[in-house]
Image (cartoon, grey):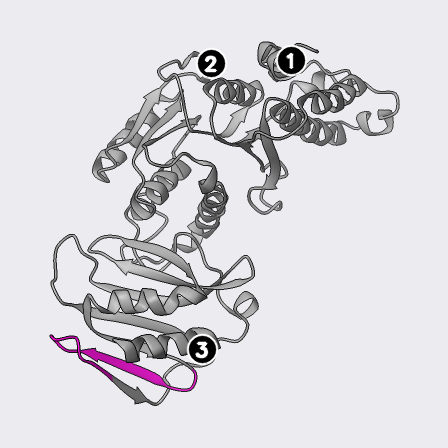
Amino acid sequence: MESLHKLASELAEQGALITATISGRRKPGETEYSKVQIKPVEIKKRLHYQFAYHYTNKVLHQNIPADALADELTKRFAEFRQGLLCTAEADYQVLISKKFKVTILKKAPSRKPLGTLSHNRKKQYVLEEGTPIPFLVELGIMNAEGRVLAKKYDKFKQINRFLEMVQDVLPHLPEGRPLTIVDFGCGKSYLTFALYHYLAVQQQRKLNVVGLDLKADVIEHCCGLARKLQYDDLRFLVGDIADYDELSAVDMVVTLHACDTATDAALEKAVRWGASVILSVPCCQHELFNQVQSEVLQPLLEHGILKERFSALATDAIRAKLLDVMGYKTQLLEFIDMEHTPKNILIRAVKSSGGNALEQWREYAAFRDFLSADPYLERACRDLLREATAGKL
């Protein structure tokens, strides 16, 4: 296999590989992937190669750095009888005998140069179009051939945006044991199913996922779909965020579009559980709208539409700062494009050992007092805030 490894090393060094396909498995099996497709992708401004492993009813993806391409290609070719490596200069057909004798045939190129990956290539989604993904088909986002329906493309982009954010926090989740995840206010559960598929199917993690919502008919539908998809570790329950007490510890809490202080109730639960990751998209922030007072801000507050938008932003700033005080590193991110809705900001918080809690509290208190605010989250977490600041509140 030395000649194959040498060729792959040269292509990796030159960044010349456009695409590759490995097929003809030596020992076919129902549980094994039948082919591997490889293509270059840019991740954090560095060249990687994405390996797509095609099973009977799913595709798993693995991204590897460019300097690992030769070793990974050689390893995969050992399981198959043939393959094709395409560059702008030539195609290389690889044939491997029963005794692992490698023959490489150089042919005329069939692919055009890629150009700059970050500008000329189609956006790489976590869930890719072109291969049917069972839960997306069942939810009416894809057809049976894997094509995203035109009316559902915004939802497809939203799901992928959410999974990109999940992808970023994977290093903050515990390893070596099943993950427990709760989705408060799951609704129709597009993102709950996406999260389960990404972690359980693509990442091969063991999970215990609970979706909670007040609407019994919606929960019944989600339960049926989970059974149909054979998502055995995904459960849906009818219930209220504030009353849910089934679990004593949770690794990730997701809350999307929980209205007003229901978001704060979910955040309180997450912190008390010691969740490693919190993902929250609030909406309908009415609490601060009825509290905020400031002579300095009067030119803004006297206009209802401006007061509403300001109150929503200030509420999320308050939530983020309180999470920082209680031991989290918090970011506010745009969830989907702002032309869809002015309120889709996602709070992403990961548990952190750093930070000066007392200094964070002083910043928060000054902001709160300036607005004459009395936030639900502060009241609900008073004991946790005292503990975080060593009782100096």
On residue 298, the disc is: none
Q: Which residue was labeled with disc 3?
A: 16
Task: Report whether 238 appears left or right of 78.
Answer: right
* Tag 3–tag 1 contact (CB < 8 Å): no
Amino acid under label 2? Ala
Identity, as a three-letter code, of the amino acid under mark 1:
Ala
Task: Determine which of the numbered discs, if any, sits on residue 390 in the image.
Answer: 1
Question: What is the quadrant of residue 200 in the picture?
Answer: top left
Identify the image quadrant of the N terminus: bottom left
Q: Residue at x 40, y 27 (%)?
A: 182
Task: Determine the image quadrant of residue 145.
Answer: bottom left
Asked if the residues shown at circle 3 and circle 2 are in contact, with their CB atoms under 8 angstroms apart, the answer is no
User: Label 3 neighbourhood size at 10 Å, few (<14), some (14-19), many (20+)?
Assistant: some
Check disc 3 and give the amino acid type.
Ala
Residue 142 on the magenta span: no
What distance separates the C-alpha of mark 3 from that of mark 2? 56 Å
Label 2 neighbour load within 10 Å: few <14, some 14-19, many 20+: few
